Amino acid sequence: MSSRGSQPPATWSGKKRVLTLALSVGLLGSLGIPAAATSFAESAGTKAAVQAAEQATTLPSGRTTYRTITDYNDEMLALSKRYPDLVKHVTLPHRTRQGREVYGIEVTRHVNTADGKPVLFMMGVHHGNEWPSGEHTMEFAYDLIKNDGKDPEITRLLDQARVIFVPVVNVDGFTINRRTSCGVSPTCASNAGVDINRNYPFGWGSNAGSNATNRGPGPGSEPEIQNIMDLTSSNQVTVLITNHTSGHTVLRPPLEKRAGDAPDEAVYAALTDAMAAKNGYTGMKSGFDYETTGETPDWSYYATRGLGFTFEIMKTQSTNNTYPEVIEDYLGTGRYAGKSNREAFMVALKYAADPAGHSVITGKAPKGAVLTITKDFNLWTAPIVQTGGVLDPPKAVPTHLESTLVAPTNGKFAWHVNPSVRPAPAYTENGVVATGPGKFLKESWTLTCARPSGEVLETVHVTVDRGEQVDVRLQECKTRFNGNGPKN
């Protein structure tokens, strides 16, 4: 977003404070956090909900069979109409190759307000034949919606965080029950399909776990993943979960061993272990399961520094007569007694909401002023493997992040954002250069304060790291806004 204000941008060096993050008592030592911190510990409400879930035999929706795409679409629309202050229906910007719309929902208190809450983003069915991945995504949405106002913890979390659900990312593939999308073929020919979970641009082209056809014709070329990238880039997604099947693993970067550990490996490992403790899955670095590139969590982490995970749910890959396993794995009953994927999702939501796990920008702006934060930088593909093993040089992938908040009636805002300090990527213009824990690029958010008409009145640069809170003083914006416009 370009500034149309007449004043030069300022560099903000406002007062910061460090927030305390408490994941769970078992993880505190690995993160160097005092055991007295309890903001992430189980509440009495959570324990009661766990017990209720263990005793239950039906999913939150009451579903007993797999959904069709019509079921998903109808249910999401119906939920938004029934709970208009809690559920917002979303049409994603890009149609599939066969022209189908892709839908999702957002769930939070006062859902239609641009309020600066942190976001948990959950999705399913990148691979069209992995039906349980969409079911668990949809059931967690029902769980939150139906328990709002009943479960104290869920009620609190929906006050503090926003949750975005896209249960079926690959609508074309799901409709014809195959792994890949329709690719560029209007007839959806099998030899033109793209594995869209190899098409994300970061590290694309190495052909680890794919080939030149399956990875797609270019980095980020497919509309289905453009939808996910757009949603992630325009929201402050502090935790992302992409559900897949199968294998009972929770996977985190790196996707290729040669890329080295993520700069946030300690925090990543701790949250992985916390979720795996609830669902009984094996938590691990993705590349040590099998190596790939071009997947969702790798791109989302290095673009935003929000923590991205792949959940490989259930132990059975087939979708034939497996719905009882969908129920048991979600609730923690039957063969999965005591280990609930629902509770792992709750851990993710609690972390997403905890301000100590991301960053916070506070301040005061004129009532109704539009605040926008942006970042622009290049990510890179891998050196691109072509036919015959020929290597083309890496391609730059211009990356733009932009989120908006509207100043409330009293002007005071607390904007929950991902850190401006970005993880140093292993995929670079010079090839793959492993960086490892603690390696970051000290970048800033560009924050603008504007009239609703779009006229930018002030621009500042805000540098903020994980667990930090920065207070900004938008005095110029307040002076100009009130001097020629609505009075505060």
Image (cartoon, grey):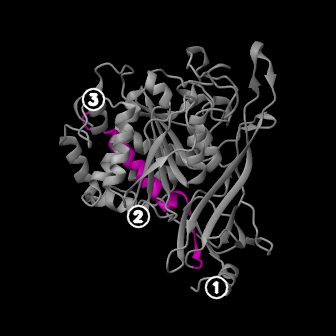
Q: Are discs 1 and 2 less than 8 Å apart at CB? A: no
User: Is residue 159 among the parts visible in the rendering?
Assistant: yes
Query: From which residue to which does the magenta span run?
Result: 337-366
Q: In this figure, which residue is indicated by the disc labeled 1?
A: 482
Q: Are discs 3 and 2 less than 8 Å apart at CB? A: no
User: Which badge, 1 or 2, comes first in the chain's sequence?
Assistant: 2
Locate residue 50, reporting x and y percent: 25, 47
User: Which badge, 3 or 1, comes first in the chain's sequence?
Assistant: 3
Please name the residue shown 27% across and 52% down the image: 146
Amino acid at circle 2: His
How many C-alpha atoms fall within 10 Å of the one at disc 1: few (<14), some, or many (≥20)? some
Amino acid at circle 3: Thr
Amino acid at circle 1: Asn
Give the vertical position of 189 relative to 72 (above or below): above
Locate residue 302, reporting x and y percent: 64, 44
Give the vertical position of 402 relative to 276 (above or below): below
Mark 3 residue element: loop
Q: Quadrant of residue 151?
A: bottom left
Kindly report the distance in space between the C-alpha atoms of the residues bearing marks 3 and 2: 32 Å
Please name the residue shown 36% across and 28% down the image: 314
The quadrant the C terminus occupies is: bottom right
Foreground mark, 3 or 1, reads 1
Q: In this figure, which residue is indicated by the disc labeled 3?
A: 65
Mark 2 residue element: loop
Give the vertical position of 7 relative to 146 (above or below): below
Residue in front for this viewpoint, 332 or 267: 332
Q: Which mark is residue 110?
A: 2
Q: Quadrant of residue 130?
A: top left
- Is 348 contained in the magenta span? yes
User: Is residue 28 among the parts visible in the rendering?
Assistant: no
Locate residue 487, reporting x and y percent: 58, 86
